[in-house]
Image (tube, coloured by chain):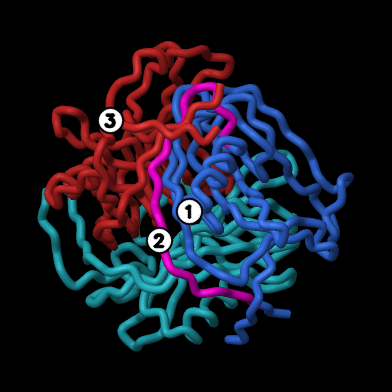
Chain colours: A cyan, B red, C blue
Amino acid sequence: MEKLWYQECNTGRRFIIKLEPGTHVTAALLDFARAKGLPFASLVSAVGSVRDVEFTGIQAGAHLPITEPRIKSHRIEGPLELMGLEGNIAQTAAKELHARFYIIASKSSGEVVGGHLVDAEVFATCEIVLAEYLVEGIERYHSTSGGVDTLFIDEESAPI
Amino acid sequence: MEKLWYQECNTGRRFIIKLEPGTHVTAALLDFARAKGLPFASLVSAVGSVRDVEFTGIQAGAHLPITEPRIKSHRIEGPLELMGLEGNIAQTAAKELHARFYIIASKSSGEVVGGHLVDAEVFATCEIVLAEYLVEGIERYHSTSGGVDTLFIDEESAPI
Amino acid sequence: MEKLWYQECNTGRRFIIKLEPGTHVTAALLDFARAKGLPFASLVSAVGSVRDVEFTGIQAGAHLPITEPRIKSHRIEGPLELMGLEGNIAQTAAKELHARFYIIASKSSGEVVGGHLVDAEVFATCEIVLAEYLVEGIERYHSTSGGVDTLFIDEESAPI
């Protein structure tokens, strides 16, 4: 079963962002996207350091849909080096902006940890490049079969 | 020994892609690139979750060229959170498209694993931003000294 | 405390770069940026393999500012698969270019390690996409409260 949906889009504005210590990254980026009216934005780069990092993973052996007992929560006090925030911000059908962010960070041991980001607080600094994409026909919705919020793309490619 | 080759290029099309559960990511992206006629494309972002992930690493202490005994294969049933697919798709001299992808994913323990991607199957969802670059003079070829497929760049910069 | 600073910027040149075995990545990219006169550049993608990797992490439980005893140094002979170099190159007030790079790499065990990159040597190959951003009012400076070099952004957004 190979299924791919896509939309071609134009590049919009680019933003270089710095978050100060103590800022909550998920909330701050969502507020920024709301203030700037970004219909769809993708994280290009995010580095610095974070503390009080909360993220989730999927239980090994889990089946779809992803339900509460199949999710494992993690909270790490840190501070951790931040190597990346990945993911995007998209609109729901109700024109609300939702984020789907993932974090890649490292402990003082050099070991890298991460997963689906709930939230994290900036420790010393956080430098971000955020790219706006001008696109239509994409909405974030809840997939009941998958158990996750994901993108609905209003056009299908059948290259395969 | 410092040696750098480069090509300046123009940005081409941007694609926001969603892969459904069960889709094989490497095959699906290569088929997409073939269908769209992308001469060179780089992964900007890829998040979601994957299962049955196959990737390779290099044996510690290995010397060049990278030969079969110097490669360690991994297969993880998962599912894993997907924090990133990195790398690019490029043409060979014979105009065939080849992918060089790397994966960054996390276990339910929060531990991050990854390496040179062979293939992975989408678990709940996979959201990708793929960027086309319009460039000439770049080809994927097999480096016998390195033992890997890499980029041949038909022009040399000597900034150093 | 939620504080966000930003600058909107235009996309500039895009470069596809290949580094040969033995090249030091931090030095090579900085020299390239100097030779090309890049005022601000962000790493989009960097894959391949590296050896003799030196990076730092932050001691668990550390407080600001980040001082020498609060930093943990790591040196890994490798070779390691390279899944990503993240971060940016920016100018100081004195118009000198400084890099702030982070590395994501994996051991033969599949375990991912990384942190704030000091330097690494290319093993078999390294393929990089580097994006120039045309922006004014951004400088790299040393934050005494944070103990780190970070971006000074000459304009404030108050979306939150």
Quadrant (top left/top right/bottom left/bottom right) for the C terminus of chain B: top right
* Residue A87 visible in the snapshot: yes
Three-letter amino acid code at the position of disc 2: Ile
Tag 2 and tag 3, C-beta contact below 8 Å: no
Q: Quadrant of residue A11?
A: bottom left
Tag 2–tag 1 contact (CB < 8 Å)? yes
Name the residue beneath numbered marker 2.
A66
Kindly identify the residue that appears in the image at 22 percent across and 41 percent down.
Answer: B27
Q: Is residue B4 left or right of residue B150?
A: right
User: Dot 3, crowdedness within 10 Å: few (<14), some or many (≥20)?
Assistant: many
Q: Is residue C96 magenta?
A: no
Q: Which mark is residue B140?
A: 3
Figure check: A92 above or below B72:
below
Give above or below for A100 relative to C57: below
Location of residue A54 in the rendering, given as x and y in whole percent from the top left corner: 63, 63
Q: Chain of mark 1?
A: A
Q: Which residue is mark 1?
A: A58
Segment colored magenta? C4-25
